[in-house]
Image (tube, rainbow, N blue to C red):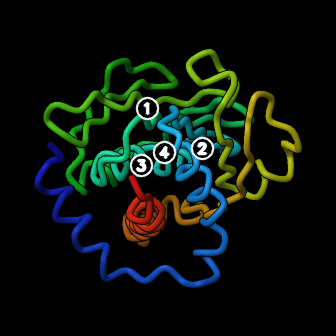
Amino acid sequence: MIFEEINSFIGDLKKVEVSNERKAILQPLADYVQEKATKNEDIRLNFICTHNSRRSHLSQVWAQTMAAYFNVKNVACYSGGTEATALFPMVATTLSNTGFKIEKLAGTDNPVYSIKYGVNAAPIIGFSKKYDAEFNPASEFAAIMTCSQADGGCPFIAGAEKRVPITFEDPKAFDGTPQQAEKYQERSTQIAAEMFYIFSNIKK
């Protein structure tokens, strides 16, 4: 089901070590997913950043992909920001380089992308939006704060059953530099490895 290139990339993630410090940060989200899976309930994960342009999208895409890879059922992943901007093009390029099939559905100032990880998988619809946009769940979801600015600036997320800060360094710092592609891939790989860790430990 998952595209071969992505499958191969995920296989290599077994060599990527997740530190004990990061495992402790990831555990509350793993516990939330496990509790829902045990009860056979829908698992809604909303990854929230300031601009919904980089880290929250990478987290949404990799969480949805890992749920499929490990056959964890009833998982729906979303992303949002404290404001809407646009999905940064380098994020789409980085995912494409890993094997995702990406198609731009609308080319406005805030483009809409179809992001597919498998032949028969429903595409992930990627575009920038506020975390409480109608496209996202209104209740019974976990809010995962992927940047410290959004975590600090949003003390309350309406409708969230659980709030989990899992912050990542922003690759934006390397925009326009020779290291840009490398740093975006590095961040994508870290997020993929951490979502791999969470979903690989879910008992079905």
> Which tag, 2 or 4, sits closer to the chain's start?
4
Residue appearing at x 16%, y 64% in the figure: 8
The amino acid pointed to by label 1 is Gly
To which quarter of the image does residue 193 belong? bottom left
Q: Distance between the residues labelled 2 and 3?
A: 15 Å
Q: Distance between the residues labelled 3 and 4?
A: 30 Å
Q: Distance between the residues labelled 2 and 1?
A: 12 Å
Residue appearing at x 48%, y 62% in the figure: 198
Front tag of 3 and 4: 4
Find numbered disc 4 in the image and state the secondary structure of the residue it sits on: helix
Q: Distance between the residues labelled 2 and 4?
A: 19 Å
The amino acid pointed to by label 3 is Val
> Which tag, 1 or 3, sits closer to the chain's start?
3
To which quarter of the image does residue 97 belong? bottom left
Find numbered disc 1 in the image and state the secondary structure of the residue it sits on: strand
Q: Mark 1 points at which residue?
A: 126
Residue appearing at x 55%, y 30% in the figure: 128
The amino acid pointed to by label 4 is Ala
* Badge 1 density bin: few <14, some 14–19, many ≥20, Cα 10 Å: many
Q: Mark 2 points at which residue?
A: 47
To which quarter of the image does residue 9 belong? bottom left
- Looking at the picture, tell me which residue is in the foreground, 53 or 125: 125
Front tag of 4 and 1: 4
Q: Can residue 7 be seen in this view?
A: yes
Image location (x, y in percent) of residue 28: 66, 60
Q: Which of the labelled discs sits on residue 37, or is there none?
A: 4
Question: Disc 2, disc 3: CB below 8 Å?
Answer: no
Image location (x, y in percent) of residue 87: 49, 37
Q: Mark 3 points at which residue?
A: 91
